[in-house]
Image: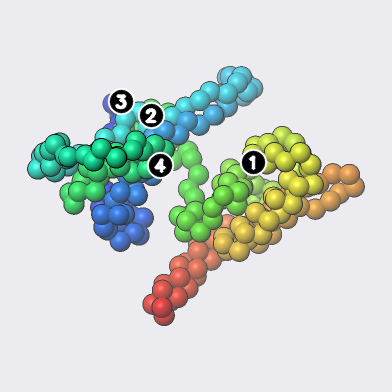
Amino acid sequence: MPAWPLAAPTTLGSLLSMLGITLGTRQRRDLAIALKRLYDVSLELPEYDDDGNETGVRARRLFTELAIFADSAVLRDLDAPRHRRSTEVTIAGEQALRGSRFVQIAEADNARVEITLAPWFAEAVLERSGKVLDLETQRALDGVAKRVWVALNMLAYVQHETLEVETHSREVDDRFLGMLRLKAQRPTDNRKTLTKALKKVLARDPTYRRAEIVRRGSRYLLEIERSTGAVRQELLRDRQRQTRESSAAT
């Protein structure tokens, strides 16, 4: 095992290239804001005893440290005294983050970032014990649909014996809807919201063959069917080719 803490130094430009985003000042600024938001995230994860019984929930952070570096000339310019108008007002929230020193440093051409992962998160990454989520689908979805899509990727699926297909079926009960943070007073409204999100997932993720809520007597079941293996990879490659062709045409 590596020595802790595990830090990952890189440039903002390298991160943007990995994400397929054109490098620029605005893009570096937006990436810095996104990293700051990730740094502030605290996940509530269940904990288990040696027998596999859930013992409770613990809040955990992804990063323990996040730092932005720039050349000394950039820092001197930021630290130079600036004349402020007497009518200047205090900014807060999103604008405060965009105008912060952290983001101003990130806007420099050669800005570098160093992320120190929390030990539990670093172990999961090194052991590849997490789920790999398709980046293009992540960027295409937002809001409830994105939250539902991530949750679908966390479910346990049953692999078909001969076909490259896997399925999942579960009851759409209060606990499952609560996990998705669907908290309307009427269950009918929550199911409608979930149905709309599933339709968006089907439209954006070609690996999903079926995703719908079906009624079985007095119960409502979520039934999922999606492609796996080589079929899944070919579907994603086809979508990537279509995206490139569409971009070239415009």
Name the residue rendered at 51%, 59% in the picture: 140
Q: Are marks 2 and 3 in contact (CB under 8 Å)?
A: no
Q: Earlier in the sequence, mark 4 or mark 2?
A: 4
Q: Which label sits on residue 118?
A: 2
Q: Quadrant of the N terminus?
A: top left
The secondary element bearing badge 1 is classed as loop
User: Which circle, 4 or 3, is nearer the viewer?
Assistant: 4
Q: In front here: 158 or 176?
A: 176
The residue carrying mark 4 is: 94
What x and y, as percent, mark residue 248?
A: 39, 77
Q: Give the residue at mark 3.
A: 4
Mark 4 residue element = helix
Task: Residue 17: give x, y in percent of width and height.
Answer: 30, 57
Q: Are dots 1 and 4 in contact, CB under 8 Å?
A: no
144 relative position to 115: left or right: right
Residue at point 40%, 42% (across, down): 94
Position of residue 243 measured from the top left corner of the image (x, y, whole percent): 45, 70
Q: How is the image coloured?
A: rainbow
Amino acid at dot 2: Ala
> Between marks 2 and 1, how big is the CA–CA gap?
25 Å
Q: Examine the rendered structure and indicate whether residue 240 appears above or below residue 36.
A: below
The local crowd at label 1, few if under 14, some if 14 to 19, many if 20 or more residues have their Cα within 10 Å, is some
Labels 3 & 1 near each other (Cβ < 8 A): no
Question: Which residue occupies the extreme front position in the image?
Answer: 86
Task: Return the disc, 3 or 1, that comes first in the chain's sequence.
Answer: 3
The answer to whether residue 44 of the structure is visible from this angle is yes
As measured in the structure, the alpha-carbon distance from the residue carrying label 3 to the one carrying label 1 is: 34 Å
The image quarter in which residue 114 lies = top left
